[in-house]
Amino acid sequence: MIGRARRRAALAVALWIVVGALVALAGRRYGHRLDLTRDGRHSLAPVTLERLGALTAPVEARAFLPSAAPPPFDRVAAATRDVLEDMVDASDGRVRLVVRDPTDPDLAPDERAALEAEAERLGLRPVALQALDADRRVVQQTVMGVVWLASDRVAVARAAERVADVEHGLVRALDALRGARTQPVIGVTTGHGEPPVLDGPLADVLGSAGRLEAITLAPDRVPPHVDLLLMVAPRRPLEPRARFVLDQFLLEGKALVVVADFVDRSPLFPDVLVPVATGLEPVLAAAGLDLAADRLVLDRAHPAPAIVGLDAAGRPARADHPLFPVATDLAEHPVTAGLRTLVVPLAVPIDASRAIAAGHAVSPLVRTAPSSVARRGLRSFDPAAARAPAPADELPGPHTVAIALRGSWDSAFADADIPPRPADAPLDARTGAPDPPPLRRAVGPARVVLVTSGARFLAAHTDALLMLQNAVDWALDDAELTALRGRRADDPPLDATDASTRLWVRLGNIAGPPLLCLLWALIRLGRRRRRDRR
């Protein structure tokens, strides 16, 4: 009896092994991926399939993907290869994939040099991949990215910063190869205390959206080839001439993305909050956007951690800070696609009622929770000061702190003289051609994205950079590809839960399957014993 059971068990195991081998062979020959995710993140997006179907001639994707890249770039390289292989499978033979590994240990020095020279000839520059090794920052210089090649054209998809950006960058570069899209020019404003965007990590993040160019708003007009102006955290106010130049740029139907602080910590006394004079208010007011710059949005019920000082050992000390509210009310809009929460430090409210009354298309992108308030007169960064209620100075929430607007409006200088060029303007500007007639009314609809939390917003939450990328794409009228990033965002939780519930769910995920297997084994054992007794 026991010997027969053993033979049957051995035969069942052998059959399962054979079945598994046959399934593996069939899957390798007739492979098909079943994607059950809600947003289809493990399959190509419809817009990608549409682009592949529009190809009229064969193209080659020459991918330079280092196999020894440090985290998280190893995941980006693997995701890039997966997406490219999916594109090859979906292209009906119109896409050919060639993968080069610049970190292959079997490459001879001359072969490695030839590979790097080939990448540079195709327009792919080496990148510095930074990673943390124990307590040291390690920088690996290598080639990483994809070059699309057609018979007479080349388009470069630079190395993505995140897995969520891989498909977006590849499809955008494929559009450029097909000639369906010209590379836009993004003007990054300088001269008003902005951080060095072009020399920092933001340049790598925004480089896939277009060509970045430094722009000084005064003394002359913005060059006509600039499609969008990006202003990040200005610290000095725009002088009248710069405001006029910005005003005329928007009246031409161009785009503006502003991520600015209107209140910040004093550089001399960090515990003191001071207003930041940006000079943007008149230009925004012409579009119907009014800022309550004398109020700060705070949320005592949903604060995020912030660095509030140094501990006894001289290390940064963190504490939940009401002036760093966590916003979960995000609009269903291309700018916030794929986002669930954002931290908006030291934000001020936006009133768009005049823009709505004027008929502009207005989308409140980020709204704080109903528990938030907009407080006037707060001048202390101390969390205790923000926790102490001041009912007479507080307006209940929710409050809009980021907004997208599309529309046409009159000039902010419609009833004023044109501000003259500054006296210290370059000689060729002062003696060149006179100003063209100023625009008093828009010649086309402009697009504006405004976030009233600046440098700390971009540093407080990783999704803030994703929102900035989406904002640039939307402002450039490129929202069709924006959803590609949101498809590969993290899965949302099933519901809002407290800490104890999350702990029990985590323990259930860990211990549940083994306990179920043990229970099943005990049931089977009990049935067998009852059968043997019979």
Image (tube, rainbow, N blue to C red):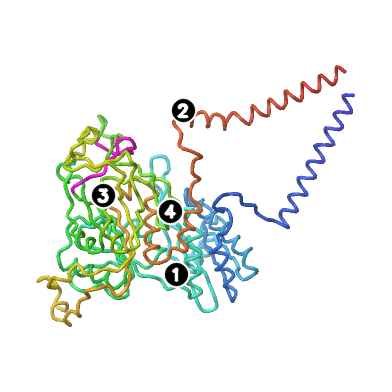
Label 1–label 2 contact, CB within 8 A? no
Task: Give the structural element (helix, strand or loop) at label 4.
Answer: loop
Inspect the image, locate mark 1, and give the three-letter code of the amino acid beneath it: Gly
From the image, tell me which residue sits under label 1.
123
Inter-mark Cα distance, 2 to 3 = 34 Å
Task: Give the structural element (helix, strand or loop) at label 2.
Answer: helix
Inspect the image, locate mark 4, and give the three-letter code of the amino acid beneath it: Glu
From the image, tell me which residue sits under label 2.
500
- Give the residue drawn at x 26%, y 70%: 249
First reached walking from the N terminus: tag 1 or tag 2: 1
From the image, tell me which residue sits under label 3.
349
- Give the residue drawn at x 17%, y 82%: 433
Task: Give the structural element (helix, strand or loop) at label 1.
Answer: loop
- Give the residue drawn at x 27%, y 72%: 442
Q: Nearer the viewer, mark 1 or mark 3?
A: 3
Inter-mark Cα distance, 1 to 2 = 53 Å
Residue 300 within the segment the image draws in magenta: yes
First reached walking from the N terminus: tag 3 or tag 4: 4
Q: In which quadrant is the N terminus drawn?
A: top right
Label number found at residue 332 = 4
